[in-house]
Image: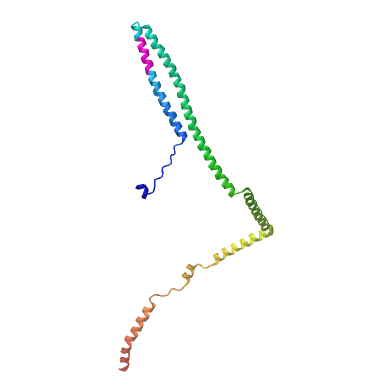
Amino acid sequence: MGNIFGKPKTKPVSRVTEQDKAILQLKQQRDKLKQYQKRIELSLEKDRELAKQCLASGRKDRAKTLLRKKKYQEKLLSNTDAQLETLEKLASDIEFAQVEAQVVSGLKVGNEALKKVNEVLSIDEVEQILDETRESIEKQQEIDALLNGVLTEEDEDDVLAELDALVAADQQQETERPDTDDITERLPEVPDDEPIKQRERQRKKEKDAPQKVAMEAQ
């Protein structure tokens, strides 16, 4: 029912490659060989102890048989060492091959990107840009040479002399310009109390006027 009304779930893409599987199998086989080696080593030690016990009890033939078995197992152990070395080398070779494949893939991507960049900037276009830049620089140098060639050395001296004269005149104006502080000191002071005294004299005249008229009438 869920698949009918719902969106079907997509199966996740496995990132495990065949090389990864091969490496895993090789490592599993290596581990099995190591376990087998441990069993053989335990058996060798056990057979050696049994052979010693048989010799001690006078069973020489039994001790000889145990030592033969021990010798055979030692050869098996030596063979497993060689097989282990082969498995580990093969696993390492596959892993290194994977790294090389990744490097090659990276080089391929980089090469494609470089091709696209080269398509955008062709050799002819780059040469044209360099030529135009070189021409612009040469033209500017010619303009500078012309401008420098218009004025002679005497003209340059006149220009410097005129510049010095302008600077001297400006300094002279600054020297002759009166100081505002000096102007203020030369102006007469205006008494602040003069209007007050005038108003007092006017009021006194108005007050004394009736008394003066009465004295004249007598």
Question: Magenta stretch: residue 51 in it?
Answer: yes
Q: Position of residue 120 (x, y in %)?
A: 58, 50
Instruction: Tell me the quadrant of the picture where the C terminus can be found.
Output: bottom left
Question: Magenta stretch: residue 7 in it?
Answer: no
Rendered image coloring scheme: rainbow
Q: Position of residue 209 (x, y in %)?
A: 33, 88
Q: Main secondary structure of the magenta part?
A: helix
Q: Position of residue 33 (x, y in %)?
A: 42, 24
Segment colored magenta = 42-52
Question: Residue 76 versus residue 146: which sits nearer the camera?
Answer: 76
Q: Quadrant of residue 56?
A: top left
Residue 145 against residue 50 in the figure, above or below: below
Q: Position of residue 117 (x, y in %)?
A: 57, 47
Q: Quadrant of residue 165?
A: bottom right
Could you tell me which residue is drawn at 45 percent across and 21 percent down?
81
Residue 43 against residue 187 in the figure, above or below: above
Could you tell me which residue is drawn at 33 percent across and 83 percent down?
203
Answer left or right for 216 relative to 27: left
Question: Residue 218 versus residue 157: which sits nearer the camera?
Answer: 157
Q: Quadrant of residue 46?
A: top left
Residue 145 against residue 187 in the figure, above or below: above
Question: Residue 135 versus residue 205: which sits nearer the camera?
Answer: 135
Could you tell me which residue is drawn at 67 percent across and 55 percent down?
142
Question: Residue 101 versus residue 152: which sits nearer the camera?
Answer: 101
